[in-house]
């Protein structure tokens, strides 16, 4: 009996010491990772909200599609293409769409402890917009029309550059071996610049002018323009996401992150719509 009591006494003495050792090891681990910096490269894709793309439809500026159709300097080349009487159909709804496109940049942060980190992302993307506009043509030689106008759809194109800066917090909610899952919350600052906008008729590009004024007629009969800064500006918002990290070795970590950003995209002082943008990002991190 006394041996049994002695065993219980030894266990009672050792167990708290082991617990204290484990706590000390955990604290040392937390202290070891706190302040650790990590950084890496981003590559992925983004599906932008389509609301800002309305600016590319050719009817939102004084020198868009109607300008060309109503200007005598372009009448002959349009008459030669359409042959018969023609007229524009003005759009009733928003139809311009952005393409899903690439998103690349850099990522850096610092661990506050084992499960919390603050970080910054900066990503650059080039976004393409596409649409069509419709022209009614009175073609009397097409029997299938039965007195109705022929509808021709002609393409419109646009492109812009965007830079996004995200500043946020990552919090780990699951960890098993080298695998971690986390959620992130962040604020967003973005800078947008319109780069190109035009429509095409008979393989000829017609630039859609923004922030422009006419500057007389050139010797070839075409209209000269003076253009100021292109549409664009600074927008603000925020977002959230979910991600998973896999620590490949002591130095490198793979990080897959989906996030959604609700932000405004400033195209000009009056047109800066809010919307939801979706992104999927693969990161290779060091640290």
Image (spheres, rainbow, N blue to C red):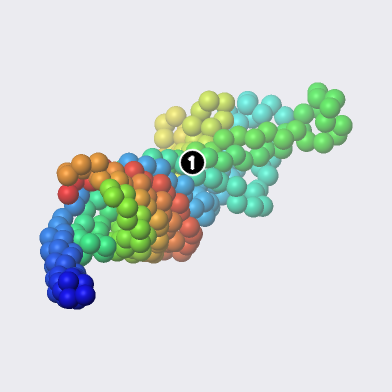
Between 125 and 198, the residue placed more toward the observer is 125
Between 140 and 256, the residue placed more toward the observer is 256
Q: Residue 148 vs residue 169: left or right?
A: right
Image coordinates for residue 84, horizontal then vertical, percent? 72, 29
Between 241 and 122, the residue placed more toward the observer is 241
Is 284 located above or below residue 24 in the figure? above
Task: Spot the residue most to the right.
Answer: 146
**Residue beneath the point at 25% across and 59% down:** 119
Q: How many marks?
A: 1
User: Is residue 260 visible to the viewer in this orientation of the structure?
Assistant: yes
Dot 1 falls on a residue whose secondary structure is loop
> Residue beneath label 1, please?
99
Q: Residue 176 vs residue 148: left or right?
A: left
Between 248 and 225, the residue placed more toward the observer is 248
**Residue beneath the point at 65% across and 35% down:** 153
Quadrant in the picture for the N terminus: bottom left
**Residue beneath the point at 17% across and 44% down:** 250
Is 37 located above or below residue 247 in the figure? below
Image coordinates for residue 198, horizontal then vertical, percent? 48, 38
Image coordinates for residue 67, horizontal then vertical, percent? 55, 45
Image coordinates for residue 31, horizontal then vertical, percent? 13, 65
**Residue beneath the point at 87% across and 32% down:** 146
Q: Residues within 10 Å of mark 1 (few under 14, many from 20)?
A: some
Task: Give the image quarter of residue 236.
Answer: bottom left
């Amino acid at each position: 009996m006394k041996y049994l009591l002695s065993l219980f006494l030894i266990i009672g003495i050792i167990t708290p010491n082991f617990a204290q050792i484990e706590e000390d090891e955990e604290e040392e681990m937390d202290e070891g990772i706190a302040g650790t910096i990590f950084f890496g490269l981003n590559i992925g894709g983004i599906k932008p909200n389509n609301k800002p793309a309305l600016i590319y439809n050719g009817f939102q500026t004084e020198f868009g599609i109607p300008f060309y159709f109503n200007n005598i300097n372009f009448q002959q080349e349009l008459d030669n293409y359409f042959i018969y009487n023609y007229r524009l159909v003005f759009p009733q709804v928003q139809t311009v769409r952005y393409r899903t496109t690439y998103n690349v940049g850099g990522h850096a942060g610092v661990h506050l402890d084992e499960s919390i980190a603050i970080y910054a992302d900066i990503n650059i993307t080039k976004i393409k917009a596409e649409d069509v506009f419709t022209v009614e043509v009175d073609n009397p030689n097409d029997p299938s029309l039965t007195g109705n106008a022929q509808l021709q759809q002609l393409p419109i194109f646009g492109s812009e550059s965007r830079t996004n800066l995200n500043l946020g917090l990552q919090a780990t909610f699951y960890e098993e071996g080298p695998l971690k899952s986390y959620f992130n919350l962040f604020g967003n600052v973005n800078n947008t610049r319109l780069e190109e906008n035009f429509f095409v008729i008979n393989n000829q590009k017609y630039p859609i002018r923004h922030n422009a004024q006419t500057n007389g007629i050139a010797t070839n009969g075409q209209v000269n323009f003076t253009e100021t800064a292109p549409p664009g500006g600074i927008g603000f918002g925020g977002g959230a996401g979910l991600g998973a990290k896999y620590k490949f070795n002591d130095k490198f970590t793979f990080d897959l992150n989906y996030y959604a950003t609700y932000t405004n995209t400033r195209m000009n002082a009056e047109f800066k719509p809010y919307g939801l943008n979706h992104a999927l990002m693969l990161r290779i991190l060091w640290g």
